[in-house]
Image (tube, rainbow, N blue to C red):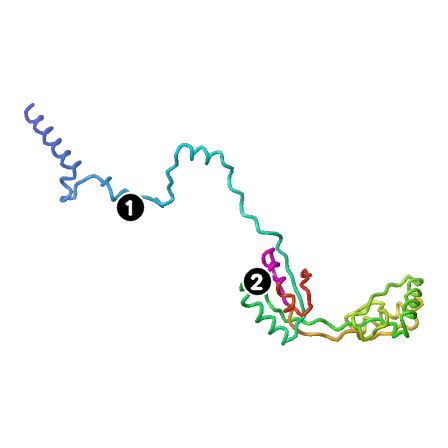
């Protein structure tokens, strides 16, 4: 009986040895493969691993974390115009090869007509100054004209419609204004407005080279 037990132990040890060494792999009996290249195939992004010396590790621990990237300067919206069709075509041909795609656009817009309460034309600059003094005595505000063809003269306020200007003139007549009248200072203008939705320092610097292309219409902050 003892001899049979010993024989079974020897046989079991032999089978285990054959299994552990992969001698029974052909019959489907073998431990999981732990040698190369299987381990290499199981690695995740090995190219990201760096071997550091003790000095490198201490330096990395002492270094503060990198600050997040900050955009260069404030980003603002800029606009210029209006530009007529010929000016718009010239502007488009100049900006397309020079500025990033999507950094600018030409928007069709219209500037409404402007009606004013007008005093003038005066005979000369002295007559204009006397009228200014009279208006200041009445504590009435006036503003410079936007249409040179109406000079020398004064505007007591601008309005988008003729009816609005007439209503304002009736109120002023109750305050002693007698010689003013309603007139159209500017007609409606249609065209394209150049809009730079997000201009940073770099883009604003590049826009400085297009003063001539803008035909004297400066870039201003969007309303």
Nearest the eye: 206 or 88: 206
Q: Residue 4 location, x and y as percent?
A: 6, 27
Q: Are marks 2 and 1 in contact (CB under 8 Å)?
A: no
Residue at 23%, 40% in the rendered image: 35
Examine the structure image and report whether residue 199 is included in the region drawn in magenta. yes
Query: Mark 2 = which residue?
Result: 103
> Is 2 located above or below residue 133 in the figure?
above
Quadrant in which residue 154 is drawn = bottom right
Quadrant in which residue 43 is drawn = top left
> Is 149 located above or below residue 138 in the figure?
below
Residue at 88%, 72% in the rendered image: 119
Q: Name the side, left or right, on which 179 lies relative to 215.
A: right
Nearest the eye: 185 or 57: 57
Count of numbered tags: 2
The label on residue 158 is none
Q: Residue 142 location, x and y as percent?
A: 85, 65
Q: Residue 47 location, x and y as percent?
A: 36, 45
Q: Name the side, left or right, on which 78 lies relative to 62.
A: right
Secondary element at tag 1: helix
> Is 10 located above or below residue 116 in the figure?
above
Q: Name the side, left or right, on which 41 lies relative to 208.
A: left
Residue at 16%, 44% in the rendered image: 28
Label 2 crowding class (10 Å Cα cut-off): few <14, some 14-19, many 20+?
some
State which quarter of the image contains the C terminus. Answer: bottom right
Q: Which residues are magenta?
A: 194-208
Query: Mark 1 = which residue?
Result: 41
State which quarter of the image contains the N terminus. Answer: top left
Label 1 crowding class (10 Å Cα cut-off): few <14, some 14-19, many 20+?
few
Examine the structure image and report whether residue 38 is included in the region drawn in magenta. no
Q: Residue 50 location, x and y as percent?
A: 38, 40
Q: Quick one: label 2 or label 1, which is nearer the N terminus?
A: 1
């Amino acid at each position: 009986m003892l001899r049979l037990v010993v024989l079974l132990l020897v046989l079991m040890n032999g089978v285990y040895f054959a299994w552990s060494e992969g001698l029974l792999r052909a019959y489907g009996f073998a431990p999981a493969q732990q040698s190369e290249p299987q381990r290499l195939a199981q690695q995740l992004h090995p190219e990201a691993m760096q071997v550091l010396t003790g000095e490198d590790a201490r330096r990395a621990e002492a270094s503060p974390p990198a600050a997040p990237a900050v955009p260069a300067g404030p980003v603002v919206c800029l606009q210029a115009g209006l530009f007529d069709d010929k000016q718009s075509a010239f502007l488009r041909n100049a900006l397309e090869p020079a500025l990033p795609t999507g950094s600018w656009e030409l928007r069709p817009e219209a500037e409404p007509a402007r009606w004013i309460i007008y005093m003038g034309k005066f005979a000369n600059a002295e007559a204009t100054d006397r009228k200014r003094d009279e208006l200041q005595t009445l504590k009435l505000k006036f503003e410079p004209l936007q249409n040179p063809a109406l000079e020398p003269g004064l505007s007591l306020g601008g309005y988008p419609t003729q009816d609005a200007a007439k209503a304002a003139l009736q109120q002023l007549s109750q305050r002693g204004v007698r010689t003013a009248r309603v007139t159209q200072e500017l007609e409606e203008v249609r065209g394209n407005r150049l809009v730079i939705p997000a201009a940073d320092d770099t883009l604003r610097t590049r826009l400085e080279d297009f003063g001539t292309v803008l035909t004297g219409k400066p870039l201003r902050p969007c309303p």
